[in-house]
Amino acid sequence: MTDVSCAVPAHNGSAPPQIVVVDDDAMLSWTVAAELAEAGYQPTVFDSGRAVLQYFAAGGSAAAVLLDWQMRGLGGADVLREFRTRGYTAPVIVLSADVGFKDAALAEGAVDFVQKANGFTIVLAHLQRVLGQGARRHVH
């Protein structure tokens, strides 16, 4: 077995921070969810913009949202507009294969943007920065 170092959130015995993952690519969203769980977060996965809006409308919450920009149906721009219209305050990090959407995502209210090709380590670093967490080291 190889030791792998990763940053984990500090939550002092309380429940791990809940991170909502929204992506219509099932393989990607479940891979990100597994990585989040390994890093000490509690992921909740949705496969559409409509599903995540229903979750929040029913009283769901999250420490942060990882949102795919290009989805079938309601895309990331539509979801962000609805989040802001409905007063949802969870910070949203947009994930996209195309860096050309960065300015639009930030203009629509995303707090950050990560190109999917950068990999999970970069997503995790951006998430920790957005959540204001120090990068504590942990060896598995």
Image: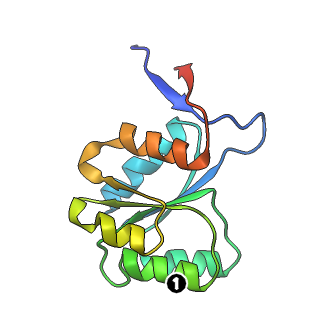
Tell me the residue that label 1 is attached to.
82
Residue that extends furthest to the right in the rendered view of this protein: 13
The one of 60 and 78 positioned closer to us in this rendering: 78
Type of residue at label 1? Glu
The percent position of residue 136, horizontal first and vertical second, equals: 59, 26
Q: Is the residue 140 above or below the residue 65 in the image? A: above
Q: Is the residue 9 above or below the residue 66 in the image? A: above
Q: Dot 1 surroundings within 10 Å: few (below 14), some, or many (20 or more)? A: some
Q: Is residue 110 visible?
A: yes
9 vs 70, left or right, is right
Question: Which quadrant of the figure has residue 99?
Answer: bottom left
71 vs 45, left or right, is left
Q: Secondary structure at mark 1?
A: helix
- The residue located at (78%, 35%) in the rendering is 13
The one of 92 and 71 positioned closer to us in this rendering: 92
The percent position of residue 133, horizontal first and vertical second, equals: 61, 39
